[in-house]
Amino acid sequence: MYVCVCKGVTDHQIRQQVSDGARSWQEVREATGCATQCGKCACFAKSVTREAVHEARLEANAGLAYAV
């Protein structure tokens, strides 16, 4: 789904940036240009970014083993 119509940024592109290593809204914004024109998409784009970062952290921690 398109998140930023002005720059043509989709939620998939935001999630891909996070998958590629972006860990903040600023990093996603710089990489995609999302919310750099009119800014109306910023709240939703931040939400998508937050969700994607949270999921990435859960995936990263899923493989950790702890000694008992």
Image: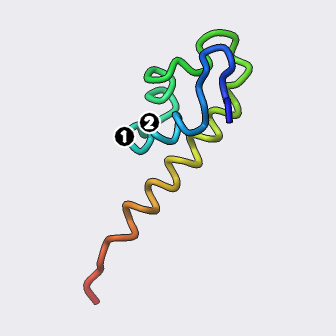
- Quarter where residue 9 is shown: top right
- Determine the residue positioned at 61% across, 20% down: 8
- Determine the residue positioned at 58% across, 21% down: 34
- Quarter where residue 23 is shown: top left
- Quarter where residue 50 is shown: top right
- Residue type of the residue flagged with mark 2: Gln
User: Where in the figure is residue 38, as x and y percent of width and height?
Assistant: 70, 11
Mark 2 Cα within 10 Å, few/some/many (few <14, many 20+)? many
Q: Is 28 placed left or right of 35 in the picture?
A: left
Q: Is 58 placed left or right of 43 in the picture?
A: left
User: Where in the figure is residue 58, as x and y percent of width and height?
Assistant: 46, 62
> The C terminus lies in which quarter of the figure?
bottom left
* Image: 33 above or below 17: above
Q: Which mark is residue 54?
A: none
- Residue type of the residue flagged with mark 1: Asp
Tag 2–tag 1 contact (CB < 8 Å): yes
> The N terminus lies in which quarter of the figure?
top right
- Determine the residue positioned at 65% across, 40% down: 47
* Image: 40 above or below 13: above
Secondary structure, mark 1, is loop
Camera-side residue of 50 and 9: 9
Q: Which mark is residue 20?
A: 1
The colour scheme used here is rainbow
Q: Which residue is mark 2?
A: 17
